[in-house]
Every structure is written in structure tokens, then in C-alpha cells.
Image (cartoon, rainbow, N blue to C red):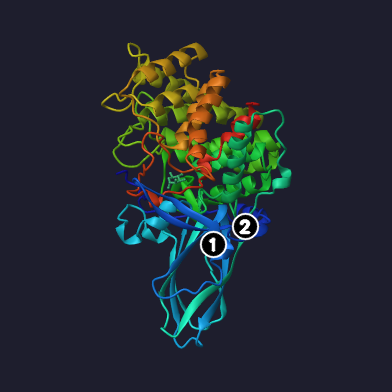
Amino acid sequence: MSSISNSIKDFRMEVNDRFVEIANACSPEFYHDTVEPVYSVDIGRTGDDWTVVKREKADTVLSAPLKEGDSVCFDFGNHQVGYVTIGLGFKGSPPDAPAFIKIKFGELPCEIGEKKEDYHGSIGAGWIQEEFFHIDEIPSVLSLNRRYAFRYMEICVLNVSPKYALTIESITCETVTSADYTQVEPLQGVSERVRKLDSVSLKTMAECMQDVFEDGPKRDRRLWIGDLRLQALTNYETFHNNTLAKRCLYLFAGLKQNEGRVGACLFTKPNLQVDDTALFDYSLFFVSCLKDYYEHTGDRETLVDLWDTAYRQIELSAMRLDAFGLVQDSDDWWCFLDWADGLNKQAGAQAILIYSIKQAIVLAEELKDDARAGQLKQLLERVTKAAIDSLWDKEKGLFVSGANRQVSWASQIWMIIAQVFDCETNIRILENCTADKDAIPMVTPYMYHHYVEALICNGMKDAALEAIDGYWGQMIDDGADCYFELYDPQNKYVSPYGSRIINSYCHAWSGTPAYFIRKYGLK
Ligand code: RAM
């Protein structure tokens, strides 16, 4: 199982008050809707999965008497993010004892079907959306304080007195998002399949757009920079909420870790706080995020403000280079890339450094910062030479990574995106990797996104659409309302956390088909 903790030593937060103030001034406006359950459903085991086995109109269950041990499950017809209110009543004698109920929420049926007690994964079980309530007064209205991400909602009556039965009179959910659908241009002249791929992508984006670009509204509900980079790119082609992107950039720059390092993720509640996790690739993505933002907005003031933070990330990464300019490997969780088991990160990290330096050079030139542009160009030469001298296996026609010279998709894809070689060689690399059955595969939509990007870098637009359809399209065929955090068409229950019930089924880094479709006119 992958380790997911890498706290930096003697962690402390470096706050830039002015940046935080600017971030706060960019807090978003929220959009709401009120939705109700559409169906009442039975969820049961079909083979080794949980599915809806029976579906009726929701109002058949409303007002039905519920005794001890009874439960009802509602289906809201689509994925929702919001606040739930339940109207409770009774049948029989005046309630002479509190009712005791359990409420479970699930993005997928498996979260309703599986028992929380059976979860022993590596991430806190507190993410499982299950609550217990004592209802002292009946009739009454129960307003749940927490925000939930769900399509299914189950209410189990754990206890009522023999003298009465509990009834559910109404259920509503007030949804919340900072995405404004009126900003999205309608797609013209695309196939129905592409339209569907795009609309699920928009839904995924909208559900994750909250106070910041969250990674997932169920889990982790926070701002991760790897996710932000892809969300912001998709946002520039869809919802055009540039202020939200600006807010996130200023938060990362305003709440840094030791030595001015940009953290891997940060929290906005209860206080603004950068996490103590540092990831080599994620810190560098601050450069990408800034370049993408500037390219789309032309907001020079922000570029000037945040340039030092971006440059600092390159300086910090350069400290990890050996004498030849090669990023040093280690056994801890120092770089993300993907959740693939046993994936060696060295080559991918080297490629991301090359990619980021190239972007930093563009920014330095834009700002006429000649001194830094010069430094960056020298560094670029050094790290590119090291990549070719030490990581390129001429015989295999593939990049290798780490002491064991591992071949992985992640290494090839990032070296292609970093454009270490020309297009012709890059296309051959993809062919060679496809032929190498031992190559470590991709396991997250995040890595698949980069695969599609690599195809587009090589001018292979048709192959890109085919890849999107074969992966995200398959997710839709498997019943996805929003795109998942993890998905392997060969192993549908994959989870790096020890159980699929803790996976997020509406996840920002998976929401990028709309970006490719709209930016590259895929039809
Ligand atoms: C998980 C989340 C998040 C991602 C990190 C690295 O916790 O899926 O989105 O960015 O991993």
C-alpha cells in the first residue's frame, strides 16, 4: 500500500499577509439549487459489486411508518453536493421516547452496501459519510450541519419506542457550487458521445468548485496543487472563474512551508493552513499554474507578485540534483506522479523539472528578468543533458528510472510532455512502451490526463479522443455521474487506500475531458 504521509521536518508556516488578503478578497460567490430525491431504491449485492436492485418513485416511501430495524434508501437521480434537511413525523401514539437513527450518504451504491466497521484502510474512516442522531422532538425538522457529496442517502431506524413509528415527510438538499453554468459556451457540432463526455466533466468540475478548487467534495475537500493545475486549465475553457484560480494561487503563495516552499495542499477551514506535506512535482506545479493563469488572463500584476514564489520552487528543486544534474531518488513519498504500486519517481520528477524550467523561462522573459532567465537556461541544459545521459536507454528506446532502471508509463509520458526529444522520437517512445508489457501502468485519471496530453503534444488528436472515450467513456458506461478519483477498467475496485469505499467518486483531477474537447476541438 502506498504511504500517504510525508511531513517535512521542523515544519512551520511562512505567511505573507498581503497575499492572504488578496486571496480573501477573491472569495467566490456561491450558486444554490434545491433538489429532492427522485427514487426510493433497494441496494443489493450483484456478484462482487453493490448495485441498485429495485427502484420506485421516492414519494412511495415518504410518510410510510418506520419501526425499529427498518431502513429506506433514496436516490437523488444524480450526484449532489450540499446541505440536507429532513422533515420527520410519526404515526401512532405521541412519541414517548427519542428516535435513534443512522444516516448514510454514498456517491456510489457500494458506500451504502459496505459496513463502516469493515473498513481498515490507510485514510481516516471519518471520511465515510455516516451519522447517528437522537431525535428528541417529533415532529421536527432535522437540518444536517455537514456538507455531503452523494447520490444515495439511506436512513436506518435504530430505535423507536413500541408506541409509535417514525415517518419521513420530506427531504431536500440545498446544493452549493461556485461554478456559474451561464459562463459555459454550448458545444457545437460534436457527437452525442463527446457531448456526454463533456457534460460529466462539467458536472465533476462544478461539484469540486467550492470555496477553492477542491480535489473532491467527499474527500479530501481541500486544495491540492496537482488537482488545481488541471482544474484551472479546464476552468479556463469552461466556467471562466479566473478569480477563483487567482485566489488559489495567492493562497499557496501566501501560506508557504519552510524555505518558501509551496506545499502540496492546504486547508481553508477552520483556519487558513498549509499542510506539512511536500511533494517535489507538486511544488513545481506552482510555476505551471502561474504560467497558465497569466496566459489566460494577462493579469500582469499577479505575475509580478507571484514570480518570486515560482522561481523559488525551481531553486529548491535544484537543491535535489546530484553533481550531474540528476534528481536524486529516495524511498519516501517525495514525489507524487501517480498511485501505481512500486512506481519509481526519478525519471518523472526529472521530466517535470525540465517542463517547469521551460515554463519559468517564458515567465522570466515576459518579465524581462534577464538574470533569472539566464540561470534557468543554464539549469535547463544541465538537467536535460542528465536526463539523456543517465535515464535514456538507447537500446530500449525508453526512459528508465531509479537504480533498478524501471520502465513506466509515467516516465515516458512526462518526458514527452517535457519535450526532451522531438515528435518523431516521442511517437516511437509511445510505441515502445505499448510493446513493453512489464512497463508500470497508469492507475489514476490524473496520469491518464497526462497520457492524453502527451498524445496531443505529438499531434495525435484522433488517438487522444479515442483514449478519452476508452477511459472516461468507460467510466460513464459503468454508471459514473461524475468522474472518479481512481479508475482501472481492468480492476474496477482499485484503491490505493485499502478500500474502494473511501475513494472519491467525483474528483477534480479526473474532470479534464472538457478541457481537451474544447481546447482542441475534439468532435
Ligand atoms: C490524494 C487525492 C488528491 C491528490 C493527492 C496526491 O489524496 O486524490 O487529489 O492530489 O492524493
> Extreme left residue here?
404
Quadrant for ligand 1 reads top left
Determine the image quadrant of residue 462. Answer: top right
* Image position, residue 46 (x, y; %): 37, 47
Q: Residues within 10 Å of mark 1 (few under 14, many from 20)?
A: some
Q: Nearer the viewer, residue 491 or 374?
A: 491
Residue type at mark 1: give it: Arg
Identified at 50% across, 14% down, the residue is 422
**Nearest to the observer: residue 40 or residue 308:** 40
Separation of marks 2 and 1 at Cα, in angstroms:
9 Å
In the displayed structure, 110 sits above or below 66; it is: above
| Labels in figure, total | 2
From this view, report whether residue 496 is shown above or below residue 350.
below
> Which image quadrant for residue 326?
top left
Q: Are marks 2 and 1 in contact (CB under 8 Å)?
A: yes
The image shows residue 329, relative to residue 179, as above or below, that is above
In terms of secondary structure, where does tag 1 sit?
loop
Quadrant assignment for the N terminus: top left
Residue 91 seen in render = yes
Helix, strand or loop status at disc 2: strand
Q: Position of residue 171 (x, y in %)?
A: 58, 67
Q: Quadrant of the C terminus?
A: top right
Left or right? Give the position of 215 relative to 118: right
Residue, disc 2 = 176
Q: Position of residue 453 (x, y in %)?
A: 53, 27
Q: Which mark is residue 147?
A: 1
Q: Give the percent coordinates (x, y) of residue 309.
A: 55, 42
